[in-house]
């Protein structure tokens, strides 16, 4: 009797394994992605939409890190352009300024060339805004630009309302700010180390979490 039960259990386990395998294979078939932009078969750290004249493929601008990386976009459907300030210095984040036809780029690889740059979409020239070691992101939220930088126990967060005049947010002096987002209303969320920071009106509050935070996402839900 015991032998019959064990045989039944073994058969049941085998059938279950076959069913799981079939589901996994079926899921893999459904997740068969098509390669978009075959010229970009390399890491991409950031991708944003812009309305800048002369940028094809839905106005997409890419941040390409590493050697021969930089600000990248298609000037036509089959012509990928990559612009950089140095062969060894890539871009980790980009943010377009459609009104002034320029792109802000955070260049960084832990070198003396790290910093925040402005790229002119007409002349294809870069202008250094300032040097900042280990930049993490440049982002536009409700017509305000935010730039976070740093590594481990140093860094900071800057903001600009016009892209020309930039100011440090003193609350984040010495903090490695890795991301910033905005929820519905006026609440800002920022991350640095293993802390989440919330700003409501003019006050920042911090909440510690068990792990280091590299990226945050805030779901904006309309009521």
Image: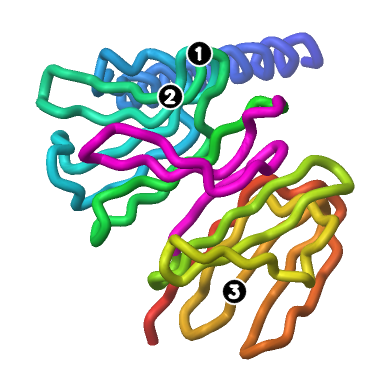
Tell me which residue sits at (73%, 49%) in the image. Answer: 213
Magenta-drawn stretch, dominant element (helix, strand or loop): strand
Residue count near mark 1 (Cα–Cα under 10 Å), binned few <14, some 14–19, many ≥20? few
**Quadrant of the snapshot with the N terminus:** top right
User: What residue did someone put label 1 on?
Assistant: 87
Mark 1 against mark 3, which lies toward the viewer? 1
Element marked by disc 3: strand
Which colouring convention does the figure follow? rainbow
Of the pair 181 and 168, the residue shown nearer to us: 168
Could you tell me if the residues under marks 1 and 2 are in contact, i.e. CB atoms within 8 Å?
A: yes
Distance, label 1 to label 3, CA atoms, is 36 Å
Q: Can residue 40 be seen in this view?
A: yes
Q: In this view, does 66 lie above or below 60?
A: above
As for residue 124 lying within the magenta part, the answer is yes
Q: Which mark is residue 84?
A: 2
- The answer to which of marks 1 and 3 sits earlier in the sequence is 1
Could you tell me if the residues under marks 1 and 3 are in contact, i.e. CB atoms within 8 Å?
A: no
What span is in magenta? 111-140
Tell whether 40 sits left or right of 171: left
Mark 2 against mark 3, which lies toward the viewer? 2
**Quadrant of the snapshot with the C terminus:** bottom left
Tell whether 95 sits left or right of 156: left
- The answer to which of marks 2 and 3 sits earlier in the sequence is 2
Q: Is residue 34 visible?
A: no
Q: In this view, does 80 lie above or below 184?
A: above
Tell me which residue sits at (46%, 69%) in the image. Answer: 144
């Amino acid at each position: 009797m015991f032998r019959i039960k064990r045989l039944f259990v073994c058969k049941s386990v085998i059938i279950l394994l076959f069913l799981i395998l079939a589901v996994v294979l079926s899921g893999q078939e459904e997740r068969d992605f098509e390669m978009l932009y075959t010229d970009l078969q390399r890491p991409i750290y950031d991708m944003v939409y812009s309305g800048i004249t002369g940028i094809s493929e839905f106005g997409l601008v890419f941040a390409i890190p590493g050697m021969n990386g930089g600000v990248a976009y298609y000037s036509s459907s089959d012509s990928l352009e990559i612009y950089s300030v140095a062969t060894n210095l890539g871009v980790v984040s980009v943010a377009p300024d459609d009104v002034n036809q320029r792109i802000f780029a955070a260049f960084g690889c832990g070198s003396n060339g790290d910093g925040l740059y402005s790229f002119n979409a007409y002349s294809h020239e870069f202008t250094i805004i300032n040097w900042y070691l280990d930049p993490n992101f440049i982002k536009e939220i409700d017509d305000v630009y935010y730039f976070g930088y740093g590594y481990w126990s140093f860094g900071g967060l800057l903001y600009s309302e016009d892209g020309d005049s930039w100011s440090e947010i003193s609350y984040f002096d010495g903090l490695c700010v890795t991301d910033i987002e905005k929820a519905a209303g006026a609440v800002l969320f920022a991350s640095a180390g293993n802390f989440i920071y919330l700003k409501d009106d003019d006050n920042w509050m911090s909440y510690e979490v068990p792990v280091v935070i590299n990226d945050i996402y805030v779901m904006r839900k309309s009521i």
